[in-house]
Amino acid sequence: MRVRRGAGVATAVALTLLLGACSGSAAPEDESPTSAGSSDVPTDEPTDEPNGEPSPSAGETPSVPVADPAHAVDPPGAREGRLWSADILVQWDKPLDDALVKQIERLKGVAHTERIGLGQVSLENRVLTVAAVDPGAYRHFARADVADFQEGWDRVAGGEMSTTQAVSKRLADKAGSIRLGNDDGAPTLHVGALTPQVPTVDMVVNTAWADDIEMATDNGLLISTDDATPASIRKPLERLVGKGASVQMLDVASRLGLDPDARLTAIPTGSTLGSVVGTYTYRVAGGQVQPDPAWVAANIRTEAVPILGSVTCHKDLFPQLRAALLEVQQQGLADEIHVGEYAGCYYPRFIANTTSLSNHAFGLALDLNVPGNQRGTVGEMDRSVVAIFKRWGFAWGGDWRYTDPMHFELAEVKRVG
């Protein structure tokens, strides 16, 4: 297979959703794989590209689009071998142990496994799961139509991401790219394929991106039980992996968005969120997030700050929050923050109508002047107050595609004093 290097940013591809949606995405049943635009999509017609490279002639293997040669891996080629059901996903907060994987593979009911990297990114107050994978191997756990969508896997290998239509619609910029985090150095990836994802996974990238995203490449294990019922191996699997791992039944997660019986894990990426939050484990009961009490005891505090008085937040938020509010006060803008309209900081919850964690679950976001700053509006928040919070390392929801002008969240750790 010939690889075309330096082709520029490739255009997004849509995949037919034939069997119903995964991860909350949906599309018309008669939609077929298409390419949006044509500047970098191989065709059988002569090209007008500046380098004069002709398109493949009849009978020649078409070139593989490589959007980012620095983050490309070998293209996967045509799919070979059978498909496997994605039945169980195990996530650790450390790299997998080879001996443990062999023990898992020997469990009765385990038919096939695949190591992947898992990390969580915070994007516009939604914590989404990114999987760093070997495209050629991981595709065997996808639905048949997704697994055989060759161009999509070629684009992932070439440095682009695969995600759902819903995620792309919410987060992609005009160039069709998504920035994975709030840090200044957070990488920006072009969306190359729009496809349903394995349950609980929101975005897929190749392993060459792992260092840039600051995530592992082998802290997750996909398990297929084939003809066996996934629940039948849950208890022996949990005994084997220990309490430090999250074990999710994906058949349940495909219906509910997550496995409510699992001990769930979020490992935020990036130098800010990752260093502050660490490993966040939680359970879900009655639709409510219940963080590990040890994490809460180590990280959540109630302290006094200027203007707002006593608030409950992550301990590492307080220095910058105090500094921002003190400057607001010193600039004579204290009246622009309405104390009675403050809606909280630490609030372990999901985003409404989703199973995505909010940054409030970490105590790293706060909502101010709620009534006049609703979602989808420009809001009434004083822009001088906004500028002060930004100087002290906060991101403002009013800058998002789907605005949330009441919302401020920690985006950068700054030294105070």
Image: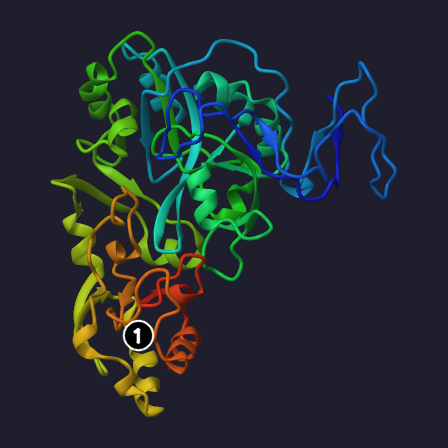
Q: Residues within 10 Å of mark 1 (few under 14, many from 20)?
A: many
**Does residue 396 show up?**
no
Residue 17, picture quadrant: top left
Q: Please name whichever residue, 336 or 412, is drawn nearer the observer in this view of the structure.
A: 336
- Residue 127, given in percent of the width and then of the height, sits at 35, 48
Circle 1 — which element?
helix
- Percent x, y for residue 196? 43, 29
Q: In this image, 277 relative to 80: left or right? A: left
Within the image, what quadrant is residue 404 found in?
Answer: bottom left
* Percent coordinates x, y for residue 140 in the rendering: 47, 18
Q: As drawn, which residue projects farthest toward the left?
A: 286
Tell me what residue is drawn at x 57 percent, y 52 percent: 174
Of residues 401 and 202, the one drawn nearer to the viewer in this rendering: 401
Residue 203 image offset from top left, x and y in percent:
45, 38
Question: Residue 145 vs residue 322: left or right?
Answer: right
Q: Residue at the spot x=44%, y=24% of the render?
A: 29
Q: Is residue 401 above or below residue 369?
A: above
- Residue appearing at x 36%, y 80% in the figure: 382
Q: Which residue is mark 1?
A: 321
Residue sitting at x 19%, y 78%: 339
When the figure is inspected, residue 240 is found, relative to residue 245, above or below; the finding is above
State the scheme by which the image is colored.
rainbow
Q: Amino acid at mark 1?
A: Leu
Q: Quadrant of residue 3?
A: top right
Q: Residue furthest top?
A: 227
Quadrant occupied by the C terminus:
bottom left
Work out which quarter of the rendered image holds the N terminus and state it.
top right
